[in-house]
Image: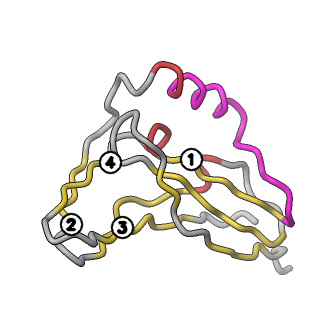
Amino acid sequence: PESKIKFALVATNGSLLPLVVRTWDHFDQNRPRLVRDNQEVGYRAGLNELIKKKDEQGATDIISLVSVTLEPNQEKTLEFIDLGEWYTPLQPGHYVLSTQHRFIQGGKWVDAASVTFEVEKKKQ
């Protein structure tokens, strides 16, 4: 339950041309959804307000800008999603994590594949 859990967001360029992908703000670009034992887990305190503000105003400030070039048929990690930035420490249970990501500021959301994992009680 007290472990740091991070997931890699991996993209594959299925086109014939190189593609430049940018990351700029975890909270503007990502919308993870975590379900524990068939119940959605809410974001940590204060995060819903931040996300609502970003959705209403758009990302006016670039936190940082990282560009990654994906060559044709190449797979690369774009960024890591640290669940500790989004959620309070996870309780024991069976989890399903899915996320949406946007590649363009204010653009459409793209669904990523989901992943399942278990959080077990800390052994004495």
As drawn, the label of residue 23 is 4
Return the residue at label 2.
70
Q: What is the spatial separation of the Cα atoms under label 1 and label 4, in whole angstroms?
A: 14 Å
Q: Of the residues under marks 2 and 4, which one precedes in the sequence?
A: 4
In the image, taking residue 37 as reference, residue 25 lies left or right, namely left
Q: Which residues are magenta?
A: 37-54
Q: What is the spatial separation of the Cα atoms under label 4 and label 3, in whole angstroms?
A: 12 Å
Q: Amino acid at mark 2?
A: Leu
**Judging from the image, what secondary structure is the residue with disc 3 in?**
strand
Q: What is the spatial separation of the Cα atoms under label 2 and label 3, in whole angstroms?
A: 8 Å
Q: Of the residues under marks 2 and 3, which one precedes in the sequence?
A: 3
Q: Residues within 10 Å of mark 4 (few under 14, many from 20)?
A: many
Disc 4 vs disc 3: Cβ atoms closer than 8 Å? no
As drawn, the label of residue 31 is 1
- Seen at 23% across and 78% down, the residue is 73
**Judging from the image, what secondary structure is the residue with disc 1 in?**
strand
Q: Is residue 103 above or below residue 56?
A: below
Q: Of the residues under marks 1 and 3, which one precedes in the sequence?
A: 3
Q: Amino acid at mark 1?
A: Arg
